[in-house]
Image (cartoon, rainbow, N blue to C red):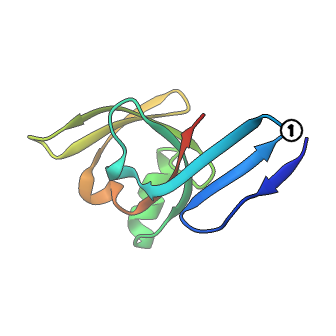
Amino acid sequence: MKLTIKFKSIFSTIQLNDNHYYEGLNLYLNELSKHESGKIISISCSDKLKSRLSSFGITRGSNIFVMEKTLSKNTIEIKINSTKIALRNSEAKFIEIEKVTC
């Protein structure tokens, strides 16, 4: 498997073999739309909140899928592993995601 980094910034492109490309865009969990997914890159918040998120399985390297977003309650429903979790947008903004598109 051949890996080539094309450029560095918030965008990244990795070449796998000769014809397959993986493209990622780093953003925050609250910026993902319904039915989008990504991988957690970092969590930048207080130790108390980080501990709470960790207890739900929200840790660096985990894959995450946005199930639903609500405007009225200002929440985002995510699926991580086999667990569904609702987070406030104010909490989701601390979770940096690499959006996965193929």
Identity of the amino acid at label 1?
Answer: Asn
| Front in this rendered view, residue 45 or 34 | 34
Is the C terminus in the top left, top right, bottom left or bottom right quadrant? top right
Residue at 63% over, 51% down? 61
- In which quarter of the view is residue 70 placed? top left
* For residue 79, above or below residue 8: above
| Front in this rendered view, residue 102 or 52 | 102
Which residue reaches farthest right? 1
Q: Secondary structure at mark 1?
A: loop
Which residue reaches farthest bottom? 46
Residue 28: x %, y % from top left: 40, 57
As drawn, is 20 to the left or to the right of 90? right
- In which quarter of the view is residue 50 placed? bottom left
Residue at 86% over, 38% down? 17
Q: Residues within 10 Å of mark 1 (few under 14, many from 20)?
A: few
Q: Which residue is mark 1?
A: 17
- In which quarter of the view is residue 52 placed? bottom left
Residue at 13% over, 41% down? 71
As drawn, is 40 to the left or to the right of 3? left
Is the N terminus in the top left, top right, bottom left or bottom right quadrant? top right
Residue 10: x %, y % from top left: 53, 64
Residue 98: x %, y % from top left: 54, 52
